[in-house]
Amino acid sequence: MKIRAIRGATQLSADTAIEMTNAVTELLAEIFSKNGIQNQDLVSILFTATSDLRSEFPAAAARQLDLAGVPLICASELDVSGALERVVRVMIHAYSPLERSDIKHVYLRGAIALRPDLAK
């Protein structure tokens, strides 16, 4: 099996720990489901968050999905003027039998606007 990178993003409705947990777990669950990813397939997960999200780390929210042993890291998204607010982006590295062209990248909620070409 090859290691594949899977992208996604979601937009939170508010900067709260509960909303962060709900949005991140929803996003990851959707990515895992659409790509047939199981926990044992995961290599690592990188999260970025816009600077207006301060209530919780996306990685801490992701731990709700029993990701013990999976390296997770968070970083700040570039603070670009006019960018979409309250966005968490993710890049998952996982073993997968899928071809690169068959990977399903997932954009949810308002983050669909970031990549409408991938959010079919």
Image (cartoon, rainbow, N blue to C red):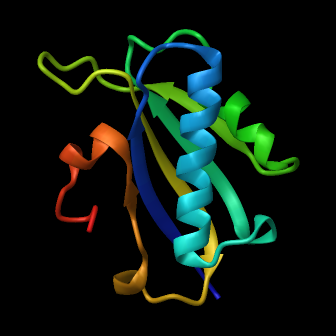
Pick the quarter of the image with the N terminus.
bottom right
The residue drawn where x is 53% and y is 49% is 27
Q: Position of residue 35 (x, y in %)?
A: 54, 76
The residue drawn where x is 37% and y is 26% is 77
Q: Position of residue 46 (x, y in %)?
A: 56, 43
Pick the quarter of the image with the C terminus.
bottom left
Q: Position of residue 101 (x, y in %)?
A: 34, 84
**Residue in the foreground of this view, choosing between 107 and 76:** 107
The residue drawn where x is 21% and y is 45% is 114
**Residue in the foreground of this view, choosing between 97 and 38:** 38
Residue 30 occupies which quadrant of the picture?
Answer: bottom right
Q: Tell me: residue 29, above or below residue 87.
A: below
Q: Tell me: residue 64, above or below residue 105.
A: above
| Number of on-image labels | 0
Q: Position of residue 83 (x, y in %)?
A: 18, 25
Residue 16 occupies which quadrant of the picture?
Answer: top right
Q: Tell me: residue 42, above or below residue 8.
A: below
